[in-house]
Image (cartoon, grey):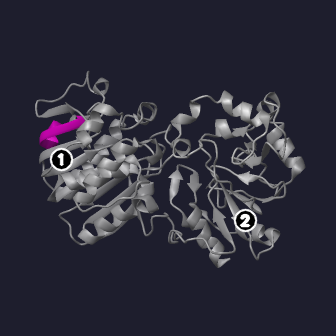
């Protein structure tokens, strides 16, 4: 099945593949090799494999191995690579074939989010992993798939050293892989970079080391500082606090992910676009908030005046089309015709019987940003009755007074209880927020 898909479809949609092709700094390559050698206390590895090898810069340390095999699907990445005699690179899909009995899998796999992966390819890969005893969620990002492949391709006493996003240590999408590793009893060291080593990627990078020879089952976490020094910490959060648990929402007070209708440029319009297409407020479109980044930190309430001032007049996307309705106005129907086939690039749209008929969300009492700098994300009282979209979460206050709940959330120290997302940026997952709401 995988061979067929390799011919028929791009595994990671080309536009997203291009954006994920980021070279590993040579200093990071050296550090990864240093950690690998430290774990084994020997001068050379017999055989090494590198999935998603790129320009094969992990091969440029020939004194560390007897043989190196790089797998890369984009030949333009390694055409000019000057490989040592004991290294070779193969053009192909790293996850298509079975590779076994390698001493070390080292490298920096691509970072592609799960919804940008070809569905058929992803299903085939997940099926292949399940046959090998590892059942992953369909929401696992590409680097989690590559990490799984690295584990399955190394010997029973092999070593895995990967430059991957730090988020895998807590995110639900990698839970099954973490449990698999724990059940096998392997020891894991995850060292996150304090510095911004990949400026164009909004995620905190780490070097993850999985030692299959060490059956102590220990998990260690640390921070790699700019001078290369490693500071070990007691928790993935980097503080003395444990990371917030993921708790399902309660029946009354709970948080909900922002609506994902399938392409904000289609479903959430600016004021200029609304006027151009003749769409009426409250009937064809309703207020929607896709970001709180530019909303003043000192303001606690998003009312009509603030909505107009900071969203409508600033030309931000803030009008959600009501295309879920059974009966659409002539103007809204005409607007949907102008979209033509651009909706087809969104799996959310292609999965629907009618591509534009999304399932609507209720209007929440509070809006909260999922990403934040500092101790607490922005939280606003939603008096304008806007729909939360995308990275903005909806908070339904239930039995709580919205003003009181707002104050409680604003005084909560989120930063010490979440995993660093990207440099100074922190991110809370919706079910971590539900954990907070459960105990307020």
Q: Viewed as shown, does residue 34 lie left or right of 364?
A: left
Q: Which residues are magenta?
A: 62-71
In the image, 55 versus 51, the foreground residue is 51
* Residue situated furthest front in the rendering: 327
* Residue situated furthest right in the rendering: 305
Residue 310: horizontal and vertical position, in percent? 81, 43
Q: Which mark is residue 28?
A: none
Q: Which residue is mark 2?
A: 410
Residue 192: horizontal and vertical position, in percent? 42, 54
In the image, 384 versus 70, the foreground residue is 384
Q: Main secondary structure of the magenta part?
A: strand
Q: Mark 2: which secondary structure? A: helix
Q: Which mark is residue 98?
A: 1
Based on the picture, tell me whether residue 348 belongs to the magenta stretch: no
Q: Mark 1: which secondary structure? A: loop
Residue shown at 23% from the left, 58% from the top: 131
């Amino acid at each position: 099945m995988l061979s067929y898909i390799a011919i028929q479809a791009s595994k990671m949609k080309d536009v997203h593949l291009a954006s994920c092709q980021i070279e590993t700094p040579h200093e990071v390559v050296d550090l990864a090799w240093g950690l690998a050698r430290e774990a084994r206390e020997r001068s050379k590895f017999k055989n090494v494999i590198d999935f998603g090898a790129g320009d094969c810069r992990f091969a440029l340390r020939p004194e560390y191995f007897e043989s190196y095999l790089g797998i890369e699907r984009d030949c333009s990445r390694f055409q000019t690579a000057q490989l040592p005699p004991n290294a070779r690179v193969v053009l192909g899909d790293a996850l298509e074939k079975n590779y076994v009995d390698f001493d070390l899998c080292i490298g920096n796999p691509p970072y592609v989010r799960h919804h940008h992966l070809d569905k058929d390819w992803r299903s085939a890969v997940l099926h292949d992993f399940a046959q090998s005893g590892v059942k992953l969620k369909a929401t696992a990002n590409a680097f989690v798939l590559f990490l799984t492949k690295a584990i399955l391709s190394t010997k029973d006493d092999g070593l895995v050293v990967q430059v991957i996003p730090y988020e895998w240590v807590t995110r639900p999408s990698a839970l099954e892989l973490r449990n698999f590793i724990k059940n096998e009893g392997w020891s894991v060291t995850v060292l996150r970079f304090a510095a911004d080593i990949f400026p164009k990627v909004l995620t905190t990078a780490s070097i993850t080391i999985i030692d299959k020879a060490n059956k102590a089952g220990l998990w260690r976490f640390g921070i790699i500082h700019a001078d290369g020094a490693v500071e070990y910490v007691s928790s993935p959060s980097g503080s003395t606090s444990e990371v917030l648990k993921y708790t399902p929402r309660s029946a009354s007070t709970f948080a909900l992910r922002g609506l994902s209708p399938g392409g904000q440029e289609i479903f959430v319009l600016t004021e200029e676009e609304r006027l151009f297409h003749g769409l009426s407020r409250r009937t064809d479109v309703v207020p929607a908030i896709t970001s709180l980044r530019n909303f003043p930190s000192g303001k606690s309430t998003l009312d009509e005046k603030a909505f107009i001032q900071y969203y409508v007049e600033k030309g931000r996307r803030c009008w959600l089309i009501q295309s879920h309705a059974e009966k659409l106005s002539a103007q809204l129907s005409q607007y949907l015709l102008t979209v033509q086939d651009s909706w087809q690039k969104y799996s959310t749209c292609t999965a629907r019987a009618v591509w534009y008929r999304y399932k609507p969300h209720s209007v929440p009492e509070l809006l909260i940003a999922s990403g934040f700098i500092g101790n607490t994300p922005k939280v606003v009282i939603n008096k304008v009755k806007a729909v939360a979209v995308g990275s903005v979460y909806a908070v339904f206050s239930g039995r709580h007074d919205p003003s009181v709940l707002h104050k409680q959330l604003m005084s909560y120290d989120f930063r010490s209880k979440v995993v660093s997302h990207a440099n100074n940026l922190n991110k809370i997952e919706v079910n971590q927020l539900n954990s907070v709401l459960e105990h307020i």
